Amino acid sequence: MMQVNELQKISAEVRSDVIKMIGKAGSGHPGGSLSIVDILVTLYNKVMKVDPKNPNWEDRDRLVLSKGHGCPALYSILARKGFFDVEQLWSLRKLGSMLQGHPDMRKTPGIDVSVGSLGQGLSVAVGLALGAKLKNKKYRVFAIIGDGEMQEGQIWEALMSSIHYKLDNLTIILDYNKLQIDGPNEEVMSLGNIRERMQAFGFDVHEIDGHNHEEIYNALSAPVIAQKPRFIIAHTVKGKGVSFMENQVGWHGKAPNAQEIEKALADIGGTTI
Amino acid sequence: MTNMKSPRIAYGEALVELGEKNELVVALDADLAHATQTALFGERFKDRFFNLGIAEQNMMGVAAGLSLCGFIPFASTFAIFGAGRAFEQIRNSICYPKLNVKIAVTHGGVTVGEDGASHQAIEDISLMRSLPNMTVIVPCDAIETKKAVFAAADIEGPVYIRIARPVAPIITKEEDNFEIGKAKVLKEGKDVSIFATGLMVAKALEAAVTLGDRGIDATVINIHTIKPLDEDLILKEVAKTSKVITVEEHTILGGLGSAVAEVLVEKGMKAQMKRIGINDTFGQSGDPEQLLEHYGLSAQNIVKVAEEMVENLK
Ligand SMILES: Cc1ncc(C[n+]2csc(CCOP(=O)(O)OP(=O)(O)O)c2C)c(N)n1
Ligand SMILES: [Mg+2]
């Protein structure tokens, strides 16, 4: 099993990729990509069973990045795991690229579900988990949702159905970075006490530091409580790893310029372009 | 006497029969299982039926997920709540990734009846045909509904089947062949071509009889597949008559009439054309037959429109 410092190294590499990709593309969502890096790195390097040489392997674990705008982080990890050539990363958002602005399962090896319209991915994850039960498959389904995304009514429909159908093969991870586009969740539309709400729904609730690989790993790999889907509240920092982006609403959907890229990469300690 | 049967009853029965033959078929509903008749499937195959509650958007996503596991999901609710409420879920979660989900909705059109405008989908065909990868089928009777269900399961990719609620005349035969995308000429004529879909096919046939008595020889074509549209047949038929009437239980904006007009105009086909449908207004409560009559979706009105068209050209 990989050591924590190794995961930290990979996370830094992914963060550098994210900055370079969005920088080259000239558009994208750095804030919400950087906040999920440690979660995704732990998932793909320590938890999920996937085969980069056989991306459609029937028994693989599935990931649904319901907050699809965070895809640069996922693309970087998939490329570095060998699902496709790392060079492809620099074509992000360009005409004809296999890496679309939001994930397209028909274009990108390793993308399990097409997402982008907030609130929809979690329902598909519920369907995948339901299908696994019906087929007696042992794979797990992971869904990452945003805190702003939780304001979508469809999220609550999906939460309800995951409890109703006792989908203990489903793990929902909330990227709780407290920010969305127009401001903090609390100002735009408060989410209340999420822990209490999820406990009241009947989830196996875990609350962690979403940048601590060990805590992430422990929450993801804790023994399954029969018939209970898992809900992990991962406290994160939007823009994590880049000092001037951290906790800044303005860095939700803006590409860094050349200077900012240099500064960001220096912060991360990654390699330059 | 014509045999009568509700297409939605036929849907429920067909789904069970399909479920017997193919264990990958699963059904989903949103608290309307008794109205849409998926309850029949639910009783027969308890573990392959999922009621998602009154949550149509989630239902479409769950259906998408099940299809990704290799299942063939049939998701049912009323047309208005499927194509309407969950439009964007159908677009982004089903059609964009071209998933093998069948959206079989009942209660299409004004023949929903007494429940009124809020429950009468009259724009769903337009919405669904605008989506890439989507196939759109509107069966004309109970027999064709069953065939549509089986044919939809046979093709890979999203299909929208719009099924009517009321008891309706059976006008096709078990032995008739049904192929998605292939329109059917039900009666040959030389004076005017009537293209109809859904329950309006029976009305068009009825109109053709009256027209015949009055010396007007009408062709009646059943357009059961709105998309892909049988362009070749449409062009061939219109070439014979140069007079076109479309009849649909749907707004005239964007449905069958629009689809046929698009083909004729783009191919430079000179023809006189009238679209019979709901004329940019909402429905209302009433007895289904009375409503059809009120909105001009009756054999009588088709006759009137055809006569005017033929008279004008004399
Ligand atoms: C249905 C829908 N509405 C609006 C948007 C536009 N949008 C993209 S990201 C975003 C904010 C998301 O906030 P959050 O879920 O908290 O994501 P994060 O903070 O992790 O970036 C919005 C409104 C969208 N993609 N989908
Ligand atoms: Mg957020």
Image (cartoon, grey):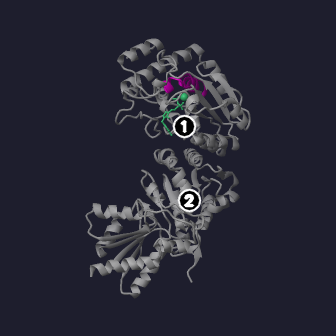
Is the residue marked 1 within 8 Å of ligand 1, measured from its CB? no
Q: Which quadrant would the N terminus of chain A be assigned to in this image?
A: top right
Q: Residues within 10 Å of mark 1 (few under 14, many from 20)?
A: few
Work out whether A210 lies above or below B285.
above
Q: Are marks 1 and 2 on the same chain?
A: no
| Residue B36, horizontal then vertical, whole percent | 61, 61
**Res. A210 mark:** none
Residue closest to the eye, B121 or B145:
B121
Q: Is residue A42 magenta?
A: yes
Q: Amino acid at mark 2?
A: Ser
Q: Can residue B241 be spotted in the picture?
A: yes
First to last magenta residue range = A31-47
Q: Which quadrant would the C terminus of chain A be assigned to in this image?
A: top left
Residue closest to the eye, B178 or A198:
A198
Residue linked to disc 1: A57
**Res. B118 mark:** 2
